[in-house]
Amino acid sequence: KKAKLDLASIEGTGEFGRVTADDVKIATGEMKPKSKVAAPGAPAPVELPDGLVPFTGMQRAVSNNMVATLDCPVFRASREIEMDAFNALYQQVKPKGVTVSALLAKAVAKAIEKHPIVNSSFRPEGTFFNKDINIAMAVAIDGGLITPVLKYANERDVLELGENWKELVGKAKSGTLSPDEYNSGTFTISNMGMFGVAQFDAILPAGQGGILAVAGTQEHIVPCKQSILGMKKISKMTVTLTCDHRQIYGADAALFLKTLNEVMMNPSQLL
């Protein structure tokens, strides 16, 4: 009566469906419902986390960095990238220790060379162009997220980038990255293709002008005049570029993505 509850609206757990005192307490929020006991032979119920878990230092830093980007006016542009030639090249260099991440960083860096505006950052006085192309790559680790940086990615060969990336990932997992190894990025790549994600947007890191969200490769059937059936199967992936709209415009993003597609379709220049 004090809670002004209609007993008819409460599901009773007592004998013959009788509403018990505990049922009323659960309905008023005074008490949490008890976990149901599994029937004999049935799978045990899954124990889910419950209650507040304080942030670690890294999680707090990630949270603060995400909030710091909210005042930045951004826009996004997506494009499908043809992947057959890139995948074939990767199969060639994979035995030499080159990862997809290193090869992708190299491709993005080569595209940035022709469109340095996406490697810029905003300043109240104007656009700050970064001479170096340092590609930060988002890596999920226990308890957080960090972005090891492949410095001078456009100038170094893929074998060197591959070795450097393995070293950086090892340091990231052991918590031994130096600040310069995760704070010096001028452009970021977030790759969730390995999880089968079809498309996603990434949040722009504070102090950078662009971040590229890379989704998974999907097979497509397209027209082909040379094929007997007039069709062929190709692989594509969707990438989404998020930009700071204060100094980067839609045409800049579109042209960068066009160049990236050309690099990925003709990846021999990455060697």
Image (tube, helix red, strand yellow):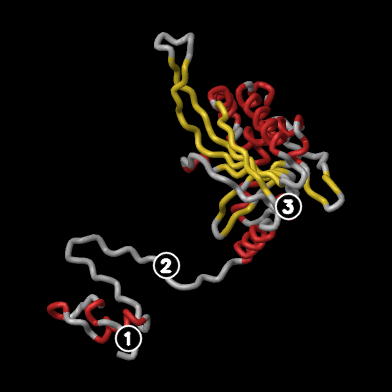
Give me the C-alpha separation between circle 3 and circle 2. Answer: 33 Å
Q: Which residue is mark 2?
A: 49
Q: Which residue is mark 1?
A: 4
Dots 3 and 1: beta carbons under 8 Å?
no
- Kindly identify which numbered label has been placed on residue 84: none
**What's the CA distance linking mark 3 and mark 1?**
57 Å
Viewer-nearest residue: 98 or 266: 266
Q: Within the image, what quadrant is residue 120 found in?
A: top right
Per the image, the residue denoted by label 3 is 183
Which residue is most to the left?
16
Quadrant of the rendering where the C terminus is positioned: top right
Query: In front: mark 3 or mark 1?
Result: 1
157 to the left or right of 224: right
Name the residue at the right extreme. Answer: 125
Image height check: is 69 above or below 164?
A: below
Image coords of residue 122 (percent x, y): 79, 49
Q: Is 92 in front, or is 52?
A: 52
What residue is drawn where x is 83% and y is 45%? 128
**Is 22 positioned to the left or the right of 99 in the image?**
left
Disc 3 is placed on an element classified as helix
